[in-house]
Image (spheres, coloured by chain):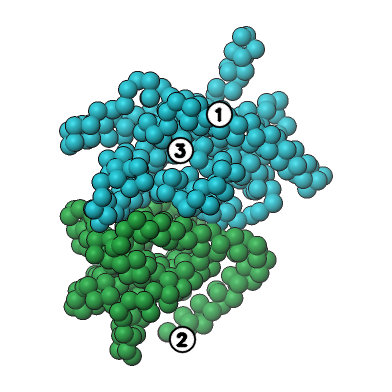
Amino acid sequence: MTYIKRKLRLYWPFSRGVIQSIMSYRVNFFMFVFGNLMRTFVVYYLWKAVFISSGSGTINGFSLNDMIIYIFMSSLTAGTIATGTDSDIGHEVMDGSIAMNLIKPISYKVRMLFMSFGSLLYQFIFILLPVWIGLIAVRYFTVGELPPDAKTIVLYLLSLMFGFFVNFLMNFSFGLLAFYVTNMWGIGHLKDASLLFFSGQLIPIAFFPELLQKIMQFFPFSSLNYIPVMIYLKKLTGMALLQALGIQILWIVLLYLLSLWFWNKATNKLVILGG
Amino acid sequence: MLKKYTRLYMKFLAQYLKSLMEYKADFLIGLFGFVVVQATGIAFLYLVFQRIPSLNGWSFNEILFIYGFAQLPRGLDHLFTDNLWLLAGRIIVRGDFDRYLLRPINPLFHLLAERFQPDAFGELIVGIALVIASVPKINITFTFSNILVFILVVICGSVIYTSIKLFFASFAFWLKFSQSILFMNYMLADFTKYPITIYSRWIRVILTFIIPFAFTAFFPAGYFVGKVSMSVAVGGTVLAAVISFAVAYTTWILGIRAYESAGA
């Protein structure tokens, strides 16, 4: 216990630092958030038109109401678990400050994790909570829809935490690409676009062609925002729910091992360059 | 005058291409990135249209045409004026703007000429491919005059893009950093890849009269599909381009006048 406490005391300032830096640029931060929300609205209107044009009440088991919640919760969940780990590592590699950070008597990986905790906490309190409350209120007053029960919310939050770790580990490995590539902006763009699609933010993974769904089982994308949101919508219950959480945990373990391997490889390369 | 600027632009471009040759892999990654962004959008449309015959009265191919058309002005603007993002994000914050004022050329020209963004070919390639693929499947007859109109509206559309970027980037003269404002407004362009008739009234009003992105895609592309009248599509687009450029350039001039170097 004291060990954990000591570690927490050691690394917590990194979380706090991230929160403070977002706070001091909060107007800009929220404008970026709002810009991204714009895309969510585009997708929302598209789906609305799709449901009106289709004439049937449900498509692939989704009613229009399901779809509205799905679209907004996907975007919210993805925005909450987002971390800047890849660009942080990228910048440190670019300006060379990673060398100084590597020789400090703290773990680089744990430091990155705590920095991500900071953004998770901030995004949870200042994006997820207020927008979620707004969504619940709008849904209640327009269609009389009630929020899901407490158990569903707890399971959603648990799955969101798993999604956060999956995202962190992915971003961490991704950031290490900066050791090999200079156009991190271009490659980040590529990553964001693929994630937007394959994590099901535009269209639920259940709508993908069967072959693509099968292929997607070998990638961690559904463990990010898709599983938590499907839990939130109660489309995953009983065994399917446990299985989904199991898949998330499996991806955390696999990506952890992958990131360790990649980290050793990348930092070895750095030593050669610096030598 | 024009000759001098063309020659200068070529010189800037040559410098840029030299650095591009150094970083070929980066160029390909950026290009591929933008192609993938567009490809996911098309995949989305394709999957959606598996379920419905038409969206709000628009067939799949008509929507592909708008979608593809939307990439052309966007890509052209992206290719030539990417430095506006840096103006909004760091050129003024770091006090680097002074040197644009010290040269005997138009500072806006200098700023834009300095950066050429080949990532934009990703958008242009996808846009051209979609337009070519969708045109034979919809009722469009391309006569000589129609092609001229097409070129005219694409150019006006890029001018609208550039003007919107220039307008918000110029805020940096007062705010030092305006990239977030610029980003927020640039994201509005996402709405115009689809028929704007699917949106609520206030969104349509904003996209038509305030931040006129609707004239970069929906109105002109709708004209070729036969859903928007010529006067709105062509007249409106030209008018929107002229007005937005006038507003943006005035803001830029006022900004330079208000500019105080952030340098030490």
**Real-space CA distance between mark 2 and mark 1, rounded to the nearest whole angstrom:** 67 Å
Q: Residue at x 38, y 28 (%)?
A: A125
Q: Is residue B143 above or below residue A170?
A: below
The green-tinted chain is: B
The residue drawn where x is 19% and y is 32% is: A144
Q: Which mark is residue A87?
A: none
Secondary structure at numbered mark 3:
loop
**Does residue B49 appear in this view?**
yes
Q: Amino acid at mark 1?
A: Gly
Q: Give me the chain letter of mark 1.
A: A
Query: Which disc is residue A225 wearing?
Result: 3
Mark seen at residue B3: 2
Q: Amino acid at mark 2?
A: Lys
Chain letter behind tag 3: A
Say if labels 2 and 3 share a chain. no
- The answer as to whether the residues below labels 2 and 1 share one chain is no
Q: Are marks 2 and 3 in contact (CB under 8 Å)?
A: no
Work out how far the residue at label 1 is from the one at label 3, CA to CA, in angstroms: 15 Å
> What amino acid is found at the position of numbered circle 3 in the picture?
Asn
Return the x and y of residue A43 as percentages of the image width and height. Answer: 34, 51
Residue A124 vertical position relative to residue B15 in the rendered view, above or below: above
The quadrant of the rendering that contains the N terminus of chain A is top right
Quadrant, the C terminus of chain A: top right
Q: Is residue B201 left or right of residue B45?
A: left
- Say which mark, if any, is on residue A246: 1
Q: Residue shown at 43%/75% (left/top)? A: B133
